[in-house]
Amino acid sequence: MSLKKNKQLILITGCAGFIGYHLTLSLSKNNNYLLFGIDNLNDYYDINLKKDRLKNLKKYINNFNFFKIDISNEKAIRNNFNNYKYDYVINLAAQAGVRYSIDNPRAYLKSNIDGFFNILDHSNRIKVKHLIYASTSSVYGDSKDFPLKENFHTSSPQSFYAATKKSNEIMAHAYSSIFKLPTTGLRFFTVYGPYGRPDMALFKFTKAILEDKTISLFNSGNHVRDFTYIDDITNAISKIIEKPKKNKLPYQIFNIGSGDPKKLTLFLSRIEKELNKKSKKIMKGFQLGDVKKTHANIDALSKVTSFKPKNNINSGIKKFIDWYKKYYSK
């Protein structure tokens, strides 16, 4: 298909998801890019939230091309890649959630293994300039060494979700090694912000407090997380799109986090302060598949891109709650 070849064609899979939505909006500011999005709009969480994100993308971005495709559908992916010959592919489509993977592992096998293979294989077939894909801080398992560095041991996942993401990294390494396909894996650390996922702590806590419902604090709220605001994530990704590794093995992995971990109880207290309302809490034990702490070392990413997080949890939580109140007052 003939397209404007003065522009770089970028595909973002999972464009109606939380990170994919914000990344697509962010990249739309670059006039050198022509953006394409793929999403299957599944019902893992409120599909209306995904549809509203998609409406915004179509409203605010000129020449945005959307395809409703499940990345596990090999024929549909093959045909799409044949038609558009993308320059860059950013794979953010995946079955997310640590806890959901315990009860529904096949959903992760289909999306995160079969689906990722389709994206990987067809990116190689059309020779994209750079394949960027989402991994997760969960690959580090229940590490005792902090901050977490990319060269740390990652062979003891605590959940099947983490296992599928580690598998993605290994699959990408093989394709980079054999076919010299430039790949970059991004280990995201607890991303939050407006239009966030309803299964994440910030969304659940805010909703429960406003509705006078009880919050379950697993591990009595003693978890520590490297909370990372969504704009810092999209800023980091935008900096590496045109910076694939050019060594003999064009493969790299980066942590993307704030580098400033906070205890979950502190995170909750900031939400309470912003809402000016105390939560009702039940303290519970440690939950299967969870880890006690995450803390990203972001030196590698900073060295390559001069990346520096700009948002702390005070400003980030405020932005989310402002969005939440406006969105659910409609």
Image: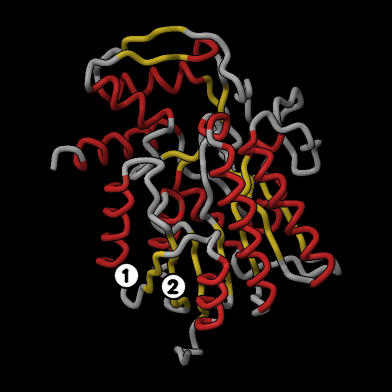
Tell me residue 227's x, y (percent). Answer: 51, 34
Looking at the picture, which amino acid does disc 1 mark?
Ile
Question: Is 203 left, or right, of 97 in this rendering?
Answer: left
From the viewer's perspective, is residue 170 above or below residue 244? above
- Label 2's element? strand
User: Label 1 to label 2, Cα distance in Å?
Assistant: 9 Å
* Residue furthest to the left: 330
Sort mark 2 into few (<14), some (14-19) or many (20+) by Cα contacts within 10 Å.
many
Residue at horizontal 71 percent and vertical 54 percent from the top = 303
Residue at 32% from the left image edge and 42% from the top image edge: 46
Q: How is the protein colored in the picture?
A: secondary structure
- Residue at the (42%, 61%) spot, across then down: 26
The answer to the question of whether label 1 and label 2 lie on touching residues, with beta carbons closer than 8 A, is yes
Residue that badge 2 annotates:
35
Residue 61 numbered mark, or none: 1
From the viewer's side, name the closer residue of 197 and 148: 197
Left or right: where 88 falls relative to 279: right
Position of residue 314 relative to residue 81, above or below, is above
Q: Quadrant of residue 325?
A: top left
Residue at 66 percent across and 51 percent down: it is: 302
Q: Is residue 141 visible?
A: yes
Please indicate, yes or no, whether residue 315 appears anywhere in the rendered image.
no
Tag 2: amino acid: Leu
